[in-house]
């Protein structure tokens, strides 16, 4: 279990602290929802969590296999619903593996793609949120 502590600081800004590490981050409401957009919004953090979770589980798999995924990138595009209630409609994901990814990683691409698609954040999202995912294997 991990504790997260958050405090509302006013003007649609919050401060959150990660219990184990004491790392602090701030959030702001987005410009299109009455905020100043000066930092990640709460829904931005969900998109960030998805992308970094996918990278992390693929990194764990690579480490177990003796491979290296350094330089692999993820771009998540978050789209919100137009109608109320306001919620995330889609998190479109593009995973780009750099040309220097080892051949053994490319040969196990199905295993890496499955790991990414089954990361804990992805599995925690409602089915109402679309998560189209594209994998770009530049080493091929």
Image (tube, grey):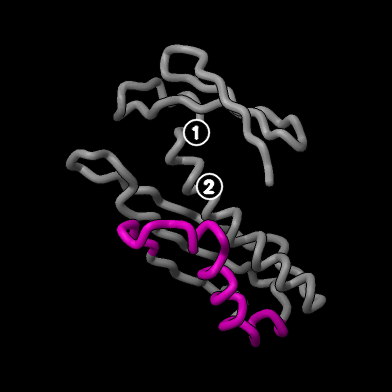
Dot label at residue 85: none
Q: Residues within 10 Å of mark 1 (few under 14, many from 20)?
A: some
Badge 2 crowding class, 10 Å Cα cut-off, few under 14, some 14 to 19, many 20 or more, is some
Residue range corresponding to the magenta coloring: 103-131
Q: Is residue 110 above or below residue 73?
A: below
Q: Residue at x 40, y 20 (%)?
A: 36
Residue sticking out furthest to the bottom: 107
* Disc 1: which residue: 40
Q: Is residue 38 above or below residue 42?
A: above
As helix, strand or loop, the secondary structure at mark 1 comes to loop
Please tell me which residue is depicted at 55% across the width and 76% down the height of the picture.
114
Asked which quadrant contains residue 102, the reply is: bottom right
State the separation of the CA atoms marked 2 and 1. 9 Å
Lower position in the chain sequence, tag 2 or tag 1: 1
| Quadrant of the frame with the C terminus | bottom right
Contact flag, marks 2 and 1 (Cβ < 8 Å): yes
Asked if residue 3 is among those painted magenta in the image, a careful observer would answer no
Task: Report which quarter residue 107 is drawn in.
Answer: bottom right
Q: Nearer the viewer, residue 72 or 124?
A: 124
Residue that badge 2 annotates: 48
> Percent x, y for residue 53?
60, 57
Look at the picture and state if 89 lies above or below 6.
below
**Picture coordinates of residue 72 (x, y %)?**
64, 62
- Residue drawn at point x = 34 percent, y = 55 percent: 90
């Amino acid at each position: 279990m991990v504790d997260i502590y958050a405090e509302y600081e006013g003007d649609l800004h919050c401060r959150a602290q990660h219990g184990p590490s004491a790392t602090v981050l701030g959030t702001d409401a987005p410009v299109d929802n009455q905020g100043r957009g000066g930092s990640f919004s709460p829904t931005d953090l969900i998109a960030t969590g998805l992308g970094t979770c996918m990278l992390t589980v693929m990194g764990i798999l690579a480490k177990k296999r003796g491979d290296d995924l350094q330089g692999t990138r993820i771009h998540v595009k978050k789209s919100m619903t137009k109608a109320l209630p306001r919620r995330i409609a889609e998190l479109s994901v593009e995973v780009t593996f750099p040309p220097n990814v080892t051949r053994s990683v490319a040969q196990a691409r199905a295993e890496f793609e499955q790991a990414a698609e089954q990361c804990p954040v992805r599995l925690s999202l409602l089915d109402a949120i679309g998560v189209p995912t594209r994998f770009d294997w530049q080493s091929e």
